[in-house]
Amino acid sequence: MEKSIAKINQLLIDHFGIPPKAKKLPDPLDTIIGTILSQNTNDQNSYKAYKNLKENFKNWGEVALLKAAQIEKYIRVAGLGKQKSKAIYELLQSLKKKQKRLSLNYIKANSDEQIIEELTLYNGVGVKTASCVLLFSLGRNICPVDTHVHRTLNRIGLVKTVNPEKTFYAILHHIPEGIAHSFHTNLIKLGRQICKPSNPQCALCPLKKICNYEQKNLTNIKESKKRDFMLLDNL
């Protein structure tokens, strides 16, 4: 599997380029709250919700003084307001109670598996959210798996899994060192732009030669060839 992942990663880089990384790793607590807000919504709306919290409060300590219903007012744009505000509220309250401070820095010395186990104890924090903390805030070689990553890897044939969490664990120990960030980011681009849930643009896919998807949509290639023949006929 390692060789297949390395090949997929290189083909994606050849097509999309190397995704830029943040100059400074964001704070783990920032990342976990931002990821909670990103669940089941688009980047634009989740960023607006995150920005609302950051701009209206000096720190997470001030947010922790609010009730869940008050937090909801600031994050409503991200959708699922009650669910997400409750998760953020309970996360902050749990940290205050367990750690006596609003910080996740205590997890940094732990292994990847220990961190996932620890973070998923918090309400509203699943494996995907925990793995985002590992990749983006701790710089670990971990590939978070959302619906795009799950769909594309199953269509390609790298895995045969029933949900994103199963996909995550199937590839967890097979990511070649140092490529998780580009692999994750470019797979999301692939899923959003080309390998869409319906009507995927397989003719444009940089992985079409190695993809095992049985229902490839090669309409674009057929139409392109048809246009070429029509042009030749008119010469």
Image (spheres, rainbow, N blue to C red):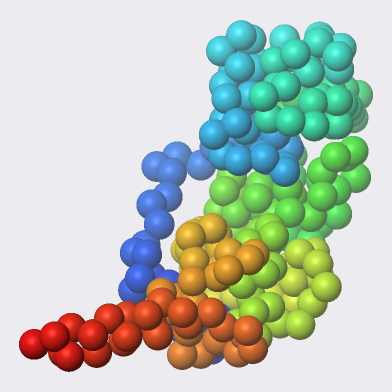
Residue 135 drawn above or below residue 9? above
Q: Nearer the viewer, residue 99 or 91?
A: 91
In the picture, the quarter occupied by the C terminus is bottom left
Image coordinates of residue 26 in percent, x first then y, are 54, 37
Residue located 51% across and 90% down the image = 210
Residue 176 as seen in the image, left or right of residue 222: right
The number of numbered badges drawn on the structure is 0
Residue located 72% across and 42% down the image = 39
- Residue 124 lies in what quarter of the image? top right
Residue 183 drawn above or below residue 216? above
Image coordinates of residue 223 in percent, x first then y, are 37, 80
- Residue 79 lies in what quarter of the image? top right
Q: Nearer the viewer, residue 192 or 15?
A: 192
Residue 138 drawn above or below residue 43? below
Q: Nearer the viewer, residue 186 or 123?
A: 186
Q: Is residue 206 visible?
A: no
In the picture, the quarter occupied by the N terminus is bottom right
Q: Is residue 191 visible?
A: yes
What residue occupies the far left of the structure in this picture? 235
Image coordinates of residue 220 in percent, x first then y, are 41, 77
Residue 157 as seen in the image, left or right of residue 209: right
Image coordinates of residue 183 in percent, x first then y, are 52, 67
Residue 125 as seen in the image, left or right of residue 40: right
Residue located 73% across and 48% down the image = 129
Residue located 60% across and 54% down the image = 135
